[in-house]
Image (cartoon, helix red, strand yellow):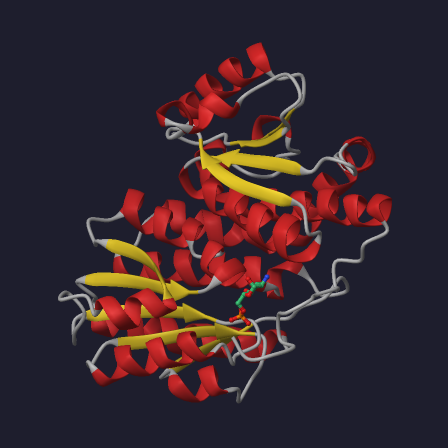
Amino acid sequence: MSSIHAEYLSKAIAAVKQKNPKNIYFVACGGSMAYMYNQQYIFDVETDIPAFILSSNEFIHRSPKGLGPDSLVVSCSHSGNTPETVEATKVARSKGALTVAYSHEENSPLWQAAEYNLHYDWGPESDAYEHKAGMALRFIFGALNALRPNEKYARALESIKDLNNIFERNKKKFAAEADKWGASHKREPIIYTMGSGPVYGEAYAFAICFLQEMLWVHSSSIHTGEYFHGPFEITDYDVPFLLFKTAGETRPLDERAENFAKKFSQKVTVLDAKDFDWTGIDKDLYSYLSTPIFGAVSRTYAERMAEHRGHPLTVRRYMWKMDY
Ligand SMILES: N[C@@H]1[C@@H](O)[C@H](O)[C@@H](COP(=O)(O)O)O[C@@H]1O
């Protein structure tokens, strides 16, 4: 698939360069929406192009005034057939926006709806560079380099060629901790996740996809900046938190939340991006690469909990089983 992936990418990036968008909307649902946080954040920090993330159905119903022929709309649906994401892409295209869609399913309804498509591989045997995480970084840094050429983006594109090894080294580094966490938290009735910046997307995905959807554990993600504006009142000695601590610009927010939570809860687990194995990656890229590394490492935490709870990550009661 790798040469087809590269071809899809270069076509989409050439179209973005030609469009030279005045604004960008990242549109998807659930885990696919969480996947957009890093991409939106990178554009936001690196350019003056306004970039927004919206859940597909809100995008449809809100109908942003800024959406038009100067817009780029990036959508994602793993299955390629989440109706609201397909419809949002159609709406964007009907307004003249450039539409680029990520999916694992070629020729799916989403694939047909978008003008440009980015396919990614899936499954434990797939190479991270050809996977969702790799494709997002390749598209974003490729588009940035086309719109605002910069050696930093070219360097990022080189570094992510090693993404698979980066993920494998970090999954190995955290394997024992993941197992310990899965075993010690398997009976917890509720687990809060925390994060900030683009990593908040991973905290959100861990809460809604892994804990709620797959493991049926009550959860909510808390932005570490928001923790002090309501959520911190639930902190107590027996309330578990899982903090994804960034190595990026918003680290002070995470440190403030960690310091407070640790004073009153005996169950604060911190996954710190500073402890990641960063071999071969320059420091100025840590912020942008930490999100996908959290994605890869945190999945192993969910897998270990699934094993200890005896509840496979594939079991659903309602999703894909009935109309909703
Ligand atoms: N846990 C799943 C996600 O993994 C998925 O991304 C989302 C939308 O589905 P899709 O990506 O197929 O549109 O549904 C759930 O949230």
Q: Residue at x 78, y 40 (%)?
A: 172
Q: Residue at x 50, y 40 (%)?
A: 221
Q: Nearer the viewer, residue 150 or 236?
A: 236
Q: Nearer the viewer, residue 128 or 227?
A: 227
Q: Nearer the viewer, residue 10 or 257?
A: 257
Q: Residue at x 29, y 67 (%)?
A: 59
- 304 above or below 33? above
- 35 above or below 256? below
Query: In the image, residue 97 lies at what x, y percent?
Result: 23, 76
Side of 70 relative to 87 (left or right): left
Side of 183 relative to 314 (left or right): right
Q: Nearer the viewer, residue 92 or 240?
A: 240
The image quarter containing residue 17 is bottom left
Query: What quarter of the picture does the N terminus occupy?
Result: bottom right
Query: In the image, residue 72 lies at what x, y percent?
Result: 27, 69
Query: In the image, residue 229 lies at what x, y percent?
Result: 35, 26
Side of 32 relative to 312 (left or right): left
Any part of residue 28 in sight? yes
Q: Residue at x 41, y 56 (%)?
A: 141
Q: How many marks?
A: 0
Q: Tell me which image quadrant ligand 1 sits in.
A: bottom right
Any part of residue 254 in sight? no
The image quarter containing residue 152 is top left
